[in-house]
Amino acid sequence: MSQLNHPNQKRRLYWLIVIALIVITNSCAVHNQAPPEIKTGEKEQGTNAEDQEIRAEQEKLNLDTDNFPGQGEPFQIGILQFTEHPALDAVHSGILEALEAAGLKPGTHTHIEYQNSQGDSQKCRLAIEKFVEDQVDLIVAIATPSAQAAVEQKDIPVLFAAVTEPQEAGLVETWEEPNTNATGVSDLNPVEVLLDMTLEIVPNAKNIGVVYNAAEVNSVVQVELSRQIADQLGVNIVKASAKNPEEVGVMTQKLVNKVDVIWVPTDNTVLSAFKELVEITNRNNIPVVGASIEFAMQGAMCATGYDYYALGLQAGDMAIELIRGTEPAAMPVQMATEIHIAINMQSAEEIGYQIPFEVLVIADQVF
């Protein structure tokens, strides 16, 4: 094992220790939070037997029925997910789990209308128009493009999740005081931690490539952060922008002869074509590091990022506050909190890399 004489090596070890402490803290925490207290409104007579039954269920759960439209009608929630991907799927699952854990039963207390735009921004707008037409009570937007489409209408509260930079995306005025009809949970990645870990695994790297879509503000923010941090670390960021999933492979191929490693931000376009990216990098023995642990599950050599299921639970708790009547304009944007590390040993072996022991011992998942 090499001695830590170089300042960058000491700096990287510092961040690895920080991550280890976070991992230990999270693993020791016990989720024992009681469902949020929701005040009961005045009892009113239902219009029919079905309404009375729903009303009775709501009162048993101590729900504020005044926050539900009509007499005992389920709260209407429209969920728009930008594309299918394990990270975003995990957010969706976490949100639903949080609602049910609070006693909000699907069909009885909530009615969920789910839409997936399959990575198409135009379909996002159409889905939001459908939610408005259906007069949903809350829109939940998963990923930045979905949230940007959702805030084009101003009458229905919007809860966003897995949005990197909501202020830059035009969703809120500030993180602390949104002052719009939107609030939610950000997944702004700890890019510094990711690059430090990258250089711990590939210490001789001088040029780090990044494939992203320059039209996605969430990705632009991450890439700019990586450029600033790379300057401090004495390495170069080599950018390649793909306008659509079909271009991801082409841009990756252009990078493989110019870089020592490729890192992938939480970019929806690249997510849709990540399998092709990994196939190309593996053929050229180029390691891939990702800004979400789901990347490691799909073939990246390593990844560090947030637990997106936990992020969904966090967003679900915020949704409950909105259902209770809290205005999104007054709810500060929250940050995801649980940083995880994942290592794909099979991918490392395939391209001839050995993962340092000091990284392996703090990894949450090893494949």
Image (tube, rainbow, N blue to C red):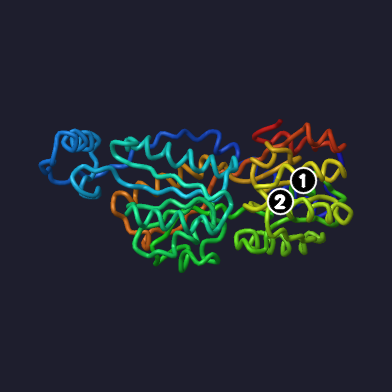
Q: Mark 1 points at which residue?
A: 288
Tell me the element at label 1. strand
Q: Is residue 333 left or right of residue 13?
A: left
Quadrant of image for the C terminus: top right
Residue at point 24% right, 49% down?
69
Please state which amino acid type lies under the numbered disc 2: Val
Please state which amino acid type lies under the numbered disc 1: Val
Q: Is residue 130 left or right of residue 21?
A: left
Residue at point 72% right, 58% down?
242
Measuring from the top left, give residue 181's x and y in whole percent: 38, 62
Q: Is residue 168 left or right of residue 261?
A: left
Residue at point 59% right, 36% down?
24
Give the quadrant of residue 31: top left
* Residue sitting at the far bottom: 173
Residue at point 53% right, 47% down?
337
Disc 2 residue crowd, few under 14, some 14–19, many 20+, Cα 10 Å: many
- Residue 264, numbered label: 2
